[in-house]
Image: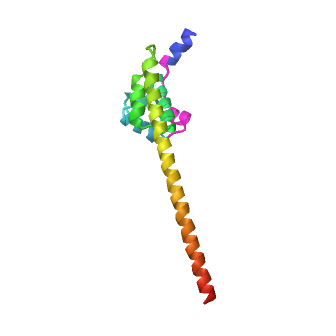
Amino acid sequence: MLEIEKERADAEYSIGGLASEFDVTPRAIRFYEAEGLLAPRRDGQRRIYTPRDRTRLKLTLRGKRLGLTLSEIRSLIDMYEPGRDERPQLERFLAVLEAHKAALERQSEDIEAQLAELAAFEKRVRKQLGARRKRNGRS
């Protein structure tokens, strides 16, 4: 079992391999690198990603699916250090999730209010159109 863990720690990934595995473009991976989320080592022009980079990419993509900003994702990922107490990271993650959920709920309320306004305007316009049709039809 230790050999497998060592193999994993020594594993290397190419940008194409990660792009294929996570169904993202190499350009997206380079963008995350430019944003400081990934730090591959270089062999000439070739980027060599470690298991740590792979995990960071996986967490970045998970955070994006949750709607987190890159800044929020970076702060959470930067807190992670294998072997350390995970409680601070988990507490921070929970706080970020709660804040994001509250923002989505506010947006949902705003959308519901806008939909109600649109429905009221639509009803008014339809009523006006109906009244005009009746007048034009009688004339």
Tell me which colouring the rendered structure shows. Answer: rainbow
Residue nearest the observer in this picture, 56 or 134: 134
* Residue 107: percent from left, percent from top: 48, 46
* Residue 67: percent from left, percent from top: 48, 39
Q: Residue at 48%, 23% (x, y): give it.
A: 51
Residue nearest the observer in this picture, 48 or 86: 86
Q: Is the magenta stretch mostly helix, strand or loop?
A: helix
Q: Residue at 52%, 32% (x, y): give it.
A: 17
* Residue 57: percent from left, percent from top: 47, 31
Quarter that holds the C terminus:
bottom right
Q: Residue at 44%, 36% (x, y): give it.
A: 29
Residue nearest the observer in this picture, 10 or 127: 127
Q: Is residue 8 above or below residue 14?
A: above
Quarter that holds the N terminus:
top right
Task: Pick out the residue farthest to the bottom.
Answer: 139
Boundaries of the magenta span: 9-24
Q: In this view, does 86 lie to the left or right of 130?
A: left
Q: Does the magenta stretch include residue 21?
A: yes
* Residue 97: percent from left, percent from top: 48, 32
Residue nearest the observer in this picture, 115 or 26: 115
Can see residue 53? no
Q: In this view, does 139 lie above or below 33?
A: below
Q: How many marks?
A: 0
Can see residue 119? yes
Which quadrant of the view contains residue 3? Answer: top right
